[in-house]
Amino acid sequence: DNMVVVVKEWVIRTPVMGRLLRDAEYISTESGDPSATLARCKQALDRGLSVLFFPEETRSLDGRMRRFHLGAFELAAQSGHDVLPIRLTNTRSCIRRRGFVIGEFSTVLRVLPRVTRDTFDYQLGAKAMMRYVKSAMEDGVASDWVLSQTDSKYGKRLAEGYRYQGLRRRLEVAKALRRDPLLARLDSLVPTDGRVFDAYCGTGLRSRLLAMKSIARAVVGADVDSSSLIVARSASRGEPNVAFEDLTLTKDSRAPFDTILLVDCLSAMSMDAAQSLLSWCAVRLERSGSIIVRAREGARKGIEQKAGGYRELFARAGFEISKERSDLARTGEFAWILRRNTP
C-alpha cells in the first residue's frame, strides 16, 4: 500500500489482471502522451508513495540488459526524489519472454546504493542520470550471474535445453551430468571472462555449461557433425554468449582463445590429424592460455596412446604438460592441462 508500479497500457486492459491492477492504482503508460504518465507519477509521489519503474520496459530475449527509457529519470530529475536501483539477474531462467512454463530457477536480487542529490548532480539532467544508473546496474552483473548458477537446480536447467531432442539425447545428457568428472570441475578450470573454444563439442553440453556458468565468457563450440550442431544450437537458443560452428569453417578464424578444450577427440584421430589440430591450437591460443586435454589410453590409428606418446605429440606442437589431472579422467583415460613450452 506504499508503492505503485508503472506498467504498459495493454497490461491494464487485460480482462482479469487489468482489473486487479486498476484497483491497486497501478499507473499505465499513456500512448503518445508521456507527460500525462509523469503527471500521475508525480501525484503518487506527492501522496508519499514510491513509484516502481522497469526502465527497459520489456523482458530481454537473451538475458542481457537492454536500452533504458528516460521516464523514471525525468521524474526523478524534475521532482528531486531519490532513485533506488534494484538489479534482477537471471530472471529468464524462471520463465523466458513469450514463454508459459515456469522452470527451475535461481535469481539474484540486489539493492544498489541509493542515488541522491548528495551522490549525483541532478542539474545534469535525466539522460546523464540514466547513464549513471545504468552503469551502476551493469557493474557486477557478471558476478551476480555466477552466483545465480550455483544452486542445486543448475543441472536441471542445463539439461532442459535437450528436452525435445529425443530420448536418446536426453539420456546421454543425464548420464554425462551424473558420471563425467570433467563436467563437475570444468568451470573452475576456465577463466570467468575469457574466450573459450570447444573442439569436437558434440551436442554442446560442455560449451553450454561454461557459457551458463559465466555470462562474461564467450564460448565457441565446433564440430564436423552437422546433426550434433543442430542439436547444440537448438539447446542453446536464447543463450547470448555461446555459438556453434562447423569445425572446418572455424579453423579459418583468427580470433585468439584463452582456453581450448580437446576432450575425447585426439584418441580417435590419426597422427597427422592430431598434429594438425594441435598446430592450429598453437596459432589460435593466447600466449598465456591453456589447453584442457582428455584422451583415452590404448593404441589406435597410429598414435602411441600412452602418456609418453601424448607428451611427444604435444611437444612437437610447442606445448608441455603443465598439470596432470587424473580427477578429470575416467577409467582408462588421461587428462592434462597444457601450456606453451617455456624457453
Image: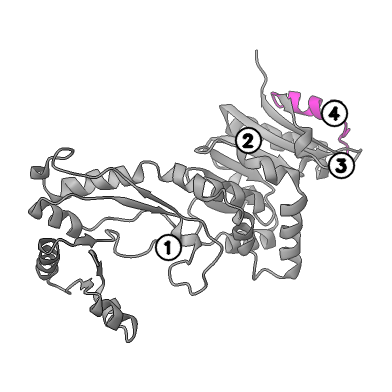
Residue that mark 2 sits on: 189
Of callouts 2 and 4, the N-terminal one: 2
Write down the region rendered in magenta.
301-320
Q: Position of residue 118 (x, y in %)?
A: 15, 38
Residue that mark 1 sits on: 61
- Identify which residue is drawn at 73% across, 59% down: 174
Of residue 333 and residue 103, the one placed in the foreground of this image is: 103
- Per the image, label 4 sits on a secondary structure element best described as helix
Cα separation, mark 3 vs mark 4, equals 14 Å
Of callouts 2 and 1, the N-terminal one: 1
- Res 259 quadrant in image: top right
Q: Position of residue 219 (x, y in %)?
A: 55, 46
Of callouts 1 and 3, the N-terminal one: 1
Q: Amino acid at mark 4?
A: Ala
Of callouts 1 and 4, the N-terminal one: 1
Of callouts 2 and 3, the N-terminal one: 2
Residue that mark 3 sits on: 331
Q: Amino acid at mark 3?
A: Thr
Q: Position of residue 25 (x, y in %)?
A: 21, 74
- Per the image, label 1 sits on a secondary structure element best described as loop
**3 and 4 marks in contact (CB < 8 Å):** no
Image quarter in which the N terminus is found: bottom left
